[in-house]
Amino acid sequence: MTARTLAVVIAVRNEKSSIGSVLEALDSQTLRPRQVVVVDDGSDDGTGDILNLAARKVHYQLATITLPSHKRSYVGRPELAEVFNAGLRVLRSDVPGPDYVMILGGDHVLPSDYAEKIVTRMEGDPKLAVASGWIVGEPYWEPAPRGSSMVVRVDFWERAGKLQFPVAYGWESWLRLKAAQMGYRTKSLRDVPTRVSRRTAPTKGALYGRAMYSLGYFWPYAFGRCFLAARGSPSNALQMLRGFVDHRGVSKLDVSDWVNAQQRTILVRRALQILRMRGRA
């Protein structure tokens, strides 16, 4: 098998205590990345000093981009897509480019065989476009790779969106849904566990609601999501509903019509199943 190349894009913000370990773990991978691009999103805790030190120690090409400081959290917002895109633009200038790109968080220290295991699975399944391991202790859904540590097939991503995330609400889910729309598969591999130093921050309700609108959720499907969320947090569910209904200034993504049609089909099928079951009762 021809050797495959991997590049990694990491977004960091005030990760002085963890980013050094993350970069060391990448250097110890059995499938070491050819290049790592770290986008420093306005850190003010000395993260930049750690990056400068790491650049002299690791055995891969380490590039850093420093963005202006800001106060607002970008978690769940379109601005975070642009942070990652700044790093992806560096990879787009490489000739030849990598075969695979990993998206990674600044606190995610990977096991030494992580990259090799994921890429080997993807090499064995040409239709597997996006894959990740499972973050221990966090929710698991097989078709949904984790945002941090997911590996993406570059030839797919080039066709899907020119190796860039859409700068819009729902950008994280877009990659998985775009793959499905194009006939590819996505997968979270439970037998490849990883751990993070802190739990993944949940997207706030209103932002999640805007993402559902941007992705084209069929309104009964979106309302059902809000209903399920209400069992855990009624206030969060109400914010989700508000974000979905009050979507001023939120643009729809290019998968929205397809997502809407898929969800309509799912709900119709379930309704017919219920009617058949009642008919046999």
Image: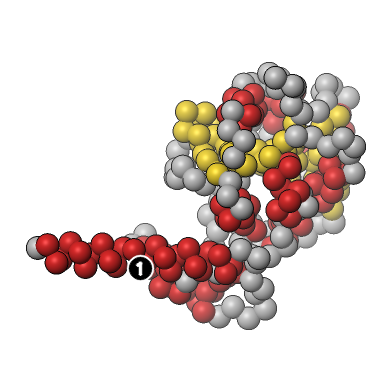
Residue 118 point in image, percent of width and height: 60, 30
Binning the other alpha carbons within 10 Å of mark 1 as few (below 14), some (14 to 19) or many (20 upward) gives few
Q: Residue at x 15, y 66 (%)?
A: 278
Which of the colour schemes (rainbow, by chain, secondary structure, one colour) is used? secondary structure
- Extreme residue toward the left, this view: 281
Residue visible at 85% across and 45% down in the picture: 92
- The answer to whether residue 41 of the structure is visible from this angle is no
Q: Is residue 269 above or below residue 8?
A: below
Inspect this view and state whether residue 79 appears: yes
SS at mark 1? helix
Kind of residue sitting beneath label 1: Val
Residue 44 at x, y percent in the picture: 80, 48
Q: Residue at x 47, y 28 (%)?
A: 191
Above or below residue 214? Residue 74 is above
The foreground one among 18 and 113 is 113
The quarter of the image holding the C terminus is bottom left
Image height of 38 relative to 33, above or below: below
Question: Which residue is at a point 74% across and 26% down the rendered structure image?
Answer: 4
* Residue 65 located left or right of residue 165: right
Q: Which quadrant of the figure contains the N terminus? A: top right
| 24 sits left or right of 211 in the view | right
**Rendered image quadrant of residue 258:** bottom right
The quarter of the picture where residue 62 lies is top right
- Does 164 sit above or below residue 128? below
Q: How many marks?
A: 1
- x, y (%) of residue 143? 49, 45
**Left or right of residue 158: residue 193:** left
Pick the front one: 171 or 18 = 171
Q: Position of residue 262 (x, y in %)?
A: 48, 63
Name the residue that disc number 1 marks: 268
